[in-house]
Amino acid sequence: MASRRQSPAPSKRTLALKRADGEPLTRADIQYDVLHAIFEDKSLAFTDPYDTAEDAPRLCFRDLYIKAIMHSSKATKALKDKMAESPVYAEDFAMLSLLVNVGRINTTMSFFPEMKTAIRTYHPIPTLQRTNGNMQDAPRIKHVLKTGLLEREANNPPTTLDEVLSRAKEGHIPATSILNLLFVLSSHSQGVGTHFSERFEFHDIFLRTEISSASRARAFLWLCFNYLENPGSAADDYDEEEKPNPFADPAKDSAPFLISLSPEEAELENVDTPEEKEWAEKLISQRDTIVKQNAVKEAGRDVMKVAELADEPSVPGDAEPKKRKRASRATVDKPKRTKGSAEKSRTGALKKGAQGSQVSTQGSTPRDDMSVEDDNPRPHLPRLMGVPEQGESDSAFRVLLGKDVEPRNGRAKANRYSPYPRSPEPAAPSKPRALRHPVPERTMLQHAWYIVNNTDPLVDSDDELGDEHDRHDYIQRLKVVTHLARQWSDPSPGLQRTLEYELSGN
């Protein structure tokens, strides 16, 4: 029969740490002295739930907690092997997991510098990163902890303190896994207050810096033993003899006494060492380097993607040439949007700077040969990467991006690639063509001489603004091409005479 004591409502206190991206978690943030005291206690008080032998040795909290993590169904083989071969890494990872277990670290944090996602923030923890092992991130750690259940409770773990005590009374010792117990204690933080002489919650173990770290650690161990091993200490409706709690106050055989500290004494706890500060700076620098390298790689992949789209030939019946061009332009011109305001964060600024350096070292982005409105893509035109051919000097060539060319008719012009200065553009006429005075026509020789001396042979014709002479020249060329197209299928000796006749303007 369950105890008549009702579990109180969950605590609404803010527990999770909140730090900016790249900011390290210090000893004071994680209350390292409390964690150290918990894991350094060697009292063999806890039953090993993973050893069914009757004479199985009892475990200290450190070994019990590490063993629970390694028996989780979601713990990877790499994690188990690393924890087995390196006791230092196992202890560091277990301390970090304990912080996740009690809600001190939420699922927006990550602790390995190779992290690529932008929805989490990176934080070095120099005190808990004494080895080169991957510390993973909070969501993965929490998933491992959530699945660290005992076989008998895999489908129905206890979720309240009363349920934990009820299972202990039924003879299930330990009443639940240590991982699940800490989730329950964190969710019902106020429920443990009846065990202590002063107002005290489970979360206070990691928040009340005016109480000594050693006494808070002992209170933590006392609570774990009380709910896992000793059901009689918190129930009042059965006569089962209580087991002595090795973490109790020796004088009263009750919850341990909480020792208060003065502000000066509190400042002496959880002090970062110079070596840890230096290690934190190295981890931040390593993270910055990785972020910049990833940004350069992403920019290179975007360039290759645009180049592939530009090289893809148009096939008959292709109904999406504009979509491909829009996609390629969006890939180059628009930054990738991610959850949150990445540009305002430190990581966003690093990526933006790295992408800018990538563009400056590689030259301009590939040439967008045709604008979005053009329906005739010309993949045979060269893509301008801003790199001169072998044997040519950098000064002999220059790249003018579309943003540097003045727009015409509301749209940007294509990139130009030329060793010559741009031809001067004539002023736009103020009158419609129908109201202008007729302009004397040039002869073919005069117009050819004018073109040679006043235009850039490497500039795309779409970039040139013509006048009446250009218009007349185009009409004459069109006549010649039209006439030749009709006779080209059957060349004859009179083809040359026909060409000369057409060019004469008769």
Image (spheres, rainbow, N blue to C red):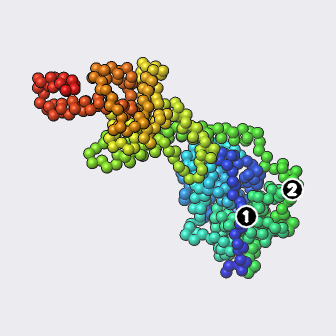
Task: Please report the residue visible at 13 percent of the width from the left and 27 percent of the height from the top.
Answer: 491
Q: Residue at x 84, y 48 (%)?
A: 268
Circle 2: is it few (<14), some (14-19), or many (20+) Cα within 10 Å? some
Looking at this view, is 458 or 255 the one in front?
458
Question: Residue 217: x and y, percent?
Answer: 77, 58
In this orientation, does residue 40 appear? no
Q: Earlier in the sequence, mark 1 or mark 2?
A: 1
Tag 1: amino acid? Arg
The image quadrant of residue 249 is bottom right
Comparing 111 with 255, the one in front is: 111
In the rendered image, the vertical position of residue 276 relative to residue 236, given as above or below: above
Query: Mark 1 highlights which residue?
Result: 13
Task: Give the Cα separation between the discs numbered 1 and 2.
Answer: 22 Å
Residue visible at 54% across and 40% down? 295
Q: Position of residue 478 (x, y in %)?
A: 24, 33
The residue wearing badge 2 is 261
| In this picture, residue 451 sits left or right of residue 392 | left
The amino acid pointed to by label 2 is Leu
From this view, report whether residue 81 is shown above or below residue 490. below
* Within-10-Å neighbours for mark 1: few <14, some 14–19, many 20+: few
Residue 493 locus on image (x, y percent): 11, 23
Residue 52 in the image: x percent, y percent?
Answer: 60, 64
